[in-house]
């Protein structure tokens, strides 16, 4: 089953990542090439991830849909709106750099909001497929290989798109619809993967809009109930909550701050080449390390390493310094990505992987509302450096909580 799943899985992930790599430059393009307001990076996080709070509703809604076929529908609705960028009227900015322009930023902004919100459906569903098709002892290694394939494809897509956008902002009318189309194909390939039986699925009695309403009402209650009944999972989510508050207070500010300093190609080189390549080099090692010392300890180590990263980012002044900082960031995020994706599967009882992953996503929704707002307020009231200092303090607290949980989980196992 592992061999079968992997043979279908990696081409789908590669295709999704190729499209995703192109679309990953959209946030920077909003400010650099379409003259969007400086609050758009924060608004993308808050508006694009706030509804993740309702992620536990989706397993119930999807219960009547054939599990593998759900990926195809998710792709159409999540990436379809970005095809409208083909009709955007973008003009180069008079007197600006060659990659600066003015255009209907709200069109790309709206498409990204839809895409980001619907990722709350895709990610738990993908994690449930991983739980069903791959054994616990192989998940770290498999996930490492998935990340490896995905990052290669993502780098290729981002660097190609970055080169075009850096030459003329009007390329946004081409690269983002192309990226959306490639991603839709990736979702269709995910829909071809059959699932192994992973426990019974409870079919809801409601249908249609009543099913949606009832599922939404139960979403928050289900999240709270699970967190109350599983203290170790609750501690795991507390650590990730503190980590996420720090990360989301800082990372949208990077776009706001550096879009005024670096052109699209310089940003793409650091953020979409150096960062993923660092993860690419390390992700296989981190996957094996997680199998050896445990997901929770890997998460704690990653949170701790984010503290010096935020200090370094406050000192960045040149493109080379930005690249060097992203090497450190890649080291941190290699561990975060593995533990973020596989952590809920470690704590989930049999048949509950989809639900636990959805609760995990719901917690992301909470910190996505608070983190960017906290960071932006401190940025406006004090300085960019002060906001990063606050983010570093959150990471210290996250590391402490997670290391304590790692010690407890080790003793129990």
Image (cartoon, rainbow, N blue to C red):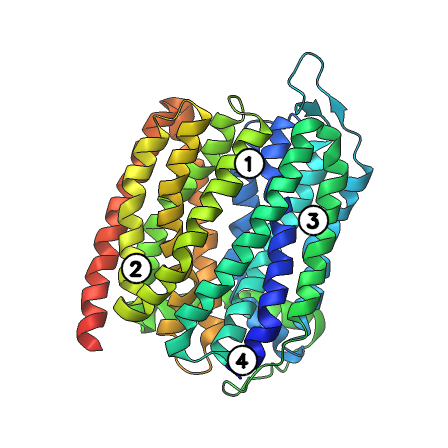
Q: Nearer the viewer, residue 140 or 259?
A: 140
**Badge 3 local density, few (<14 within 10 Å), some, or many (20+)?**
many
Image quarter where the C terminus lies is bottom left
Task: Report helix, strand or loop for mark 3.
Answer: helix
Say if residue 10 shows up in the picture: yes
Nearer the observer, disc 2 or disc 4? Answer: 4
Q: Which mark is residue 179?
A: 3
Nearer the observer, disc 1 or disc 4? Answer: 4
State the image coordinates of residue 203 (x, y, percent, origin top left): 60, 83
Classify residue 234 as left or right of residue 365: left
Comes first in the chain, label 3 or label 4: 4
Comes first in the chain, label 1 or label 4: 4
CA gap between label 3 and label 4 equals 29 Å
State the image coordinates of residue 99 (x, y, percent, origin top left): 66, 25
Nearer the observer, disc 2 or disc 1? Answer: 1
Labels 3 & 4 near each other (Cβ < 8 A): no
Labels 2 & 1 near each other (Cβ < 8 A): no
Residue 27's place in the image compared with 140, above or below, is above
Comes first in the chain, label 2 or label 4: 4
**Badge 2 local density, few (<14 within 10 Å), some, or many (20+)?**
many
Q: Which mark is residue 298?
A: 2
């Amino acid at each position: 089953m592992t061999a079968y799943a992997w043979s279908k899985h990696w081409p789908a992930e590669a295709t999704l990542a190729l499209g995703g790599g192109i679309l990953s430059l959209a946030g920077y393009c909003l400010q650099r090439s379409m003259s969007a307001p400086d609050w758009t990076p924060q608004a993308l996080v808050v508006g694009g991830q706030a509804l993740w709070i309702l992620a536990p509703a989706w397993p119930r809604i999807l219960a009547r849909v054939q599990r593998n076929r759900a990926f195809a529908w998710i792709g159409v609705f999540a990436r379809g709106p970005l095809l409208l960028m083909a009709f955007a009227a973008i003009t180069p900015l008079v007197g600006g750099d060659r990659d600066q322009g003015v255009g209907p930023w709200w069109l790309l902004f709206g498409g990204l909001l839809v895409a980001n919100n619907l990722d709350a459906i895709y990610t738990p569903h993908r994690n449930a497929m991983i739980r069903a098709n791959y054994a616990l002892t192989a998940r770290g290694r498999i996930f490492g290989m998935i990340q490896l394939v995905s990052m290669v494809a993502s780098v290729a897509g981002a660097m190609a798109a970055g080169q075009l956008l850096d030459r003329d902002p009007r390329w946004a009318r081409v690269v983002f619809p192309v990226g959306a189309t490639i991603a839709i194909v990736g979702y269709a390939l995910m829909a071809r993967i059959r699932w192994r039986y992973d426990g019974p699925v409870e079919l809801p009695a409601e249908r249609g809009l009543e099913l949606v309403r009832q599922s939404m009402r139960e979403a928050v209650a289900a999240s709270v109930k699970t967190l109350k009944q599983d203290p170790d999972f609750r501690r795991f989510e507390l650590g990730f909550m503190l980590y996420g508050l720090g990360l989301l207070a800082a990372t949208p500010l990077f776009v706001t701050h550096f879009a005024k300093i670096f052109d699209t190609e310089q940003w793409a080189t650091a953020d979409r080449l150096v960062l993923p390549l660092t993860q690419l080099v390390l992700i296989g090692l981190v996957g094996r390390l997680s199998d050896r010392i445990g997901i929770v300890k890997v998460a704690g180590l990653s949170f701790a390493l984010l503290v010096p990263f935020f200090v370094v980012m406050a000192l960045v002044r040149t493109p080379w310094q930005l690249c060097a900082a992203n090497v450190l960031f890649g080291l941190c995020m290699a561990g975060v990505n593995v533990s973020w994706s596989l952590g809920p599967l470690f704590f989930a009882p049999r048949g509950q992987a989809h639900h636990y992953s959805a609760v995990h996503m719901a917690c992301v929704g909470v910190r996505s509302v608070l983190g960017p707002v906290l960071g932006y307020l401190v940025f406006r009231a004090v300085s960019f450096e002060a906001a990063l200092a606050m983010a570093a303090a959150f990471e210290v607290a996250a590391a402490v909580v997670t290391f304590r949980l790692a010690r407890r989980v080790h003793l129990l196992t």
